[in-house]
Amino acid sequence: MSEPDLHTARTAYDAVAAFYADQFKDTLDDRPIERGLLAAFAETVRRGPAGPVVDLGCGPGHIAAHLHGLGLSMLGVDQSAEMLAIGRARYPEVRFALGSITSLGLADGSCRGIVSRSSVIHLPPALLSSALSEFARVLAPGGWLLLSFSATDGPEPPYEYYDHRVTAAYRWWPDHVVSLLHAAGIVEKARVIANPEPDDRRQFRVASILARKASAT
Protein backbone atom coordinates (compact mmCIF):
# COMPACT_ATOMS: atom_id res chain seq x y z
CA MET A 1 0.00 0.00 0.00
CA SER A 2 1.31 3.43 -0.92
CA GLU A 3 1.34 6.45 1.38
CA PRO A 4 -1.55 8.92 0.97
CA ASP A 5 -0.82 11.59 -1.60
CA LEU A 6 -2.94 14.57 -2.69
CA HIS A 7 -2.34 14.04 -6.41
CA THR A 8 -3.27 10.37 -6.14
CA ALA A 9 -6.38 11.27 -4.15
CA ARG A 10 -7.48 13.80 -6.77
CA THR A 11 -7.11 11.28 -9.57
CA ALA A 12 -8.93 8.59 -7.59
CA TYR A 13 -11.89 10.81 -6.74
CA ASP A 14 -12.16 12.08 -10.30
CA ALA A 15 -12.45 8.46 -11.42
CA VAL A 16 -15.27 7.55 -9.01
CA ALA A 17 -17.08 10.91 -8.91
CA ALA A 18 -20.39 9.78 -10.44
CA PHE A 19 -20.59 6.59 -8.35
CA TYR A 20 -19.56 8.43 -5.16
CA ALA A 21 -22.14 11.19 -5.70
CA ASP A 22 -24.97 8.67 -6.09
CA GLN A 23 -23.84 6.53 -3.14
CA PHE A 24 -23.54 9.40 -0.68
CA LYS A 25 -26.22 11.88 -1.75
CA ASP A 26 -28.48 10.63 1.06
CA THR A 27 -25.70 9.95 3.56
CA LEU A 28 -27.32 12.08 6.28
CA ASP A 29 -30.71 10.37 6.16
CA ASP A 30 -29.78 7.63 8.64
CA ARG A 31 -27.25 9.64 10.67
CA PRO A 32 -29.16 11.85 13.13
CA ILE A 33 -26.05 12.63 15.17
CA GLU A 34 -24.32 14.10 12.13
CA ARG A 35 -27.41 16.10 11.20
CA GLY A 36 -27.49 17.41 14.75
CA LEU A 37 -23.83 18.47 14.61
CA LEU A 38 -24.38 20.28 11.33
CA ALA A 39 -27.48 22.00 12.73
CA ALA A 40 -25.56 23.12 15.83
CA PHE A 41 -22.71 24.38 13.66
CA ALA A 42 -25.11 26.31 11.41
CA GLU A 43 -26.91 27.91 14.37
CA THR A 44 -23.61 28.90 15.98
CA VAL A 45 -22.25 30.43 12.76
CA ARG A 46 -25.49 32.34 12.07
CA ARG A 47 -25.05 34.17 15.38
CA GLY A 48 -21.81 35.75 14.14
CA PRO A 49 -21.10 38.31 11.42
CA ALA A 50 -22.24 37.76 7.83
CA GLY A 51 -19.98 36.04 5.36
CA PRO A 52 -19.44 32.79 3.46
CA VAL A 53 -19.01 29.36 4.98
CA VAL A 54 -16.63 27.02 3.19
CA ASP A 55 -17.03 23.27 2.84
CA LEU A 56 -13.45 22.06 2.32
CA GLY A 57 -13.21 18.81 0.42
CA CYS A 58 -16.87 19.22 -0.49
CA GLY A 59 -17.00 16.39 -3.03
CA PRO A 60 -20.28 16.52 -5.00
CA GLY A 61 -21.66 19.19 -2.68
CA HIS A 62 -24.42 17.38 -0.77
CA ILE A 63 -23.25 18.61 2.65
CA ALA A 64 -22.81 22.18 1.38
CA ALA A 65 -26.36 22.03 0.00
CA HIS A 66 -27.65 20.74 3.34
CA LEU A 67 -25.98 23.65 5.16
CA HIS A 68 -27.37 26.10 2.59
CA GLY A 69 -30.79 24.77 3.55
CA LEU A 70 -29.94 25.64 7.16
CA GLY A 71 -29.42 29.28 6.24
CA LEU A 72 -25.69 29.50 5.42
CA SER A 73 -24.12 31.06 2.33
CA MET A 74 -21.97 28.18 1.12
CA LEU A 75 -18.83 27.84 -0.98
CA GLY A 76 -17.73 24.28 -1.77
CA VAL A 77 -14.01 23.75 -2.40
CA ASP A 78 -12.54 20.51 -3.73
CA GLN A 79 -9.51 19.44 -5.76
CA SER A 80 -11.58 17.06 -7.91
CA ALA A 81 -12.93 18.84 -10.99
CA GLU A 82 -15.28 15.91 -11.68
CA MET A 83 -16.82 16.18 -8.21
CA LEU A 84 -17.31 19.92 -8.65
CA ALA A 85 -19.00 19.45 -12.03
CA ILE A 86 -21.58 17.18 -10.39
CA GLY A 87 -22.06 19.66 -7.54
CA ARG A 88 -22.65 22.58 -9.90
CA ALA A 89 -25.25 20.60 -11.85
CA ARG A 90 -27.12 19.32 -8.79
CA TYR A 91 -26.89 22.26 -6.41
CA PRO A 92 -26.97 25.59 -8.29
CA GLU A 93 -27.67 27.39 -5.01
CA VAL A 94 -24.11 26.60 -3.85
CA ARG A 95 -20.96 28.22 -5.25
CA PHE A 96 -18.04 25.89 -6.02
CA ALA A 97 -14.32 26.45 -6.56
CA LEU A 98 -11.36 24.25 -7.40
CA GLY A 99 -8.69 24.24 -4.69
CA SER A 100 -6.50 22.16 -2.39
CA ILE A 101 -6.90 22.14 1.39
CA THR A 102 -3.21 22.98 1.70
CA SER A 103 -3.52 26.01 -0.61
CA LEU A 104 -7.06 27.35 -0.68
CA GLY A 105 -6.62 30.51 -2.72
CA LEU A 106 -8.95 32.43 -0.40
CA ALA A 107 -8.25 35.76 1.28
CA ASP A 108 -7.06 35.94 4.89
CA GLY A 109 -9.97 35.96 7.34
CA SER A 110 -12.56 35.73 4.57
CA CYS A 111 -14.64 32.82 5.94
CA ARG A 112 -17.08 33.06 8.84
CA GLY A 113 -17.09 29.28 9.14
CA ILE A 114 -15.43 26.14 7.80
CA VAL A 115 -16.74 22.61 7.64
CA SER A 116 -14.30 19.86 6.76
CA ARG A 117 -15.66 16.30 6.70
CA SER A 118 -12.95 13.69 6.11
CA SER A 119 -10.93 16.05 3.89
CA VAL A 120 -7.81 15.61 6.06
CA ILE A 121 -7.73 11.81 5.98
CA HIS A 122 -5.81 11.69 2.70
CA LEU A 123 -3.06 14.01 3.93
CA PRO A 124 0.41 12.63 4.68
CA PRO A 125 1.20 13.30 8.36
CA ALA A 126 3.83 15.90 7.43
CA LEU A 127 1.13 18.06 5.78
CA LEU A 128 -1.57 18.00 8.46
CA SER A 129 -0.17 20.92 10.45
CA SER A 130 0.19 23.15 7.38
CA ALA A 131 -3.33 22.30 6.23
CA LEU A 132 -4.82 23.25 9.60
CA SER A 133 -2.78 26.47 9.55
CA GLU A 134 -4.31 27.20 6.15
CA PHE A 135 -7.76 26.68 7.68
CA ALA A 136 -6.83 29.18 10.40
CA ARG A 137 -5.53 31.70 7.85
CA VAL A 138 -8.81 31.93 5.92
CA LEU A 139 -11.05 31.74 8.98
CA ALA A 140 -12.22 35.10 10.31
CA PRO A 141 -11.45 36.02 13.93
CA GLY A 142 -14.15 34.42 16.05
CA GLY A 143 -15.07 32.09 13.18
CA TRP A 144 -16.08 28.46 13.69
CA LEU A 145 -14.68 25.18 12.39
CA LEU A 146 -16.41 21.78 12.30
CA LEU A 147 -13.74 19.19 11.53
CA SER A 148 -14.54 15.48 11.17
CA PHE A 149 -12.17 12.61 10.47
CA SER A 150 -11.57 8.90 10.98
CA ALA A 151 -10.28 8.41 14.53
CA THR A 152 -7.69 6.19 16.13
CA ASP A 153 -6.98 5.63 19.82
CA GLY A 154 -3.42 7.03 19.93
CA PRO A 155 -1.38 8.37 21.50
CA GLU A 156 1.62 6.80 19.76
CA PRO A 157 1.69 6.97 16.90
CA PRO A 158 -0.88 9.79 16.57
CA TYR A 159 -2.11 8.38 13.26
CA GLU A 160 -2.90 5.03 11.67
CA TYR A 161 -2.62 4.21 7.99
CA TYR A 162 -5.52 2.33 6.40
CA ASP A 163 -6.70 1.31 2.96
CA HIS A 164 -9.68 3.57 2.27
CA ARG A 165 -12.21 2.32 -0.29
CA VAL A 166 -11.24 5.11 -2.75
CA THR A 167 -7.57 5.75 -1.98
CA ALA A 168 -5.05 5.45 0.85
CA ALA A 169 -5.83 7.37 4.03
CA TYR A 170 -5.03 7.97 7.70
CA ARG A 171 -7.00 7.80 10.90
CA TRP A 172 -5.94 10.50 13.37
CA TRP A 173 -5.73 10.64 17.16
CA PRO A 174 -8.18 13.43 18.12
CA ASP A 175 -5.91 14.90 20.82
CA HIS A 176 -3.12 15.25 18.25
CA VAL A 177 -5.39 17.08 15.83
CA VAL A 178 -6.66 19.37 18.59
CA SER A 179 -3.08 20.22 19.61
CA LEU A 180 -2.28 21.22 16.02
CA LEU A 181 -5.43 23.33 15.87
CA HIS A 182 -4.46 25.07 19.11
CA ALA A 183 -1.01 25.84 17.70
CA ALA A 184 -2.73 27.45 14.70
CA GLY A 185 -4.93 29.63 16.94
CA ILE A 186 -8.11 27.53 16.84
CA VAL A 187 -9.48 26.28 20.17
CA GLU A 188 -11.61 23.17 20.68
CA LYS A 189 -15.08 23.86 22.12
CA ALA A 190 -16.75 20.45 21.80
CA ARG A 191 -15.96 16.92 20.67
CA VAL A 192 -18.11 13.98 19.58
CA ILE A 193 -16.75 10.48 18.95
CA ALA A 194 -19.22 8.35 17.01
CA ASN A 195 -18.84 4.57 16.98
CA PRO A 196 -20.14 2.69 13.93
CA GLU A 197 -23.46 0.89 14.09
CA PRO A 198 -23.63 -2.72 12.86
CA ASP A 199 -25.50 -1.74 9.69
CA ASP A 200 -23.42 1.41 8.98
CA ARG A 201 -21.54 1.54 5.68
CA ARG A 202 -18.72 3.20 7.61
CA GLN A 203 -17.07 0.66 9.92
CA PHE A 204 -14.79 2.93 11.93
CA ARG A 205 -14.94 5.60 14.63
CA VAL A 206 -15.39 9.22 13.56
CA ALA A 207 -14.27 12.23 15.58
CA SER A 208 -16.01 15.57 15.11
CA ILE A 209 -14.34 18.64 16.61
CA LEU A 210 -16.18 21.95 16.95
CA ALA A 211 -13.60 24.69 17.40
CA ARG A 212 -13.30 28.46 17.22
CA LYS A 213 -10.59 30.82 16.08
CA ALA A 214 -9.63 33.44 18.65
CA SER A 215 -11.40 36.78 18.26
CA ALA A 216 -9.40 39.86 17.30
CA THR A 217 -8.26 41.93 20.26
Image (spheres, helix red, strand yellow):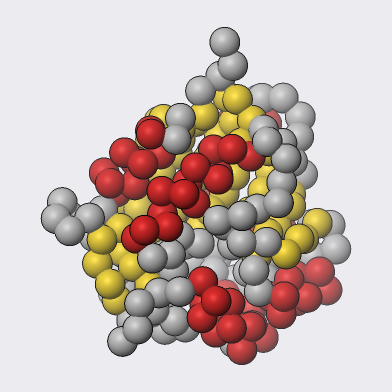
Name the residue furthest left: 156
Above or below, comparing residue 83 to residue 183 in the picture: below
Answer with the quarter of the image where residue 83 lies. Answer: bottom right
Residue with the most extreme top position: 217
Residue 58 falls in which quadrant of the image? Answer: bottom right
Confirm whether residue 150 shows in the render.
no
> Where the C terminus falls, by quadrant?
top right
Whole-percent x, y for residue 108 in the image: 68, 36
Q: Quadrant of the N terminus?
A: bottom left
Q: With 178 as the anchor, is 167 left or right in this view? A: right
Query: Could you say which quadrant of the image residue 121 lies in?
Result: bottom left
Nearest the camera: 76 or 25?
76
Q: Where is residue 82 in the image (x, y as percent from the top left)?
A: 71, 80
- Residue 25 point in image, percent of width and height: 63, 73
Q: How many labels does the image show?
A: 0
User: Would residue 170 be visible to someone looking at this image?
Assistant: yes
Vertical placement of residue 90 versus 210, above or below: below
163 lies left or right of 130: left
- Figure check: 193 above or below 96: above
Q: Residue at x 40, y 74 (%)?
A: 4
Who's the residue at 46% across and 30% down the image? 185
**Residue located 44% across and 81% down the image:** 167
- Residue 52, horizontal then vertical, whole percent: 74, 41
User: Residue at the location (54% across, 63% down)?
Assistant: 28
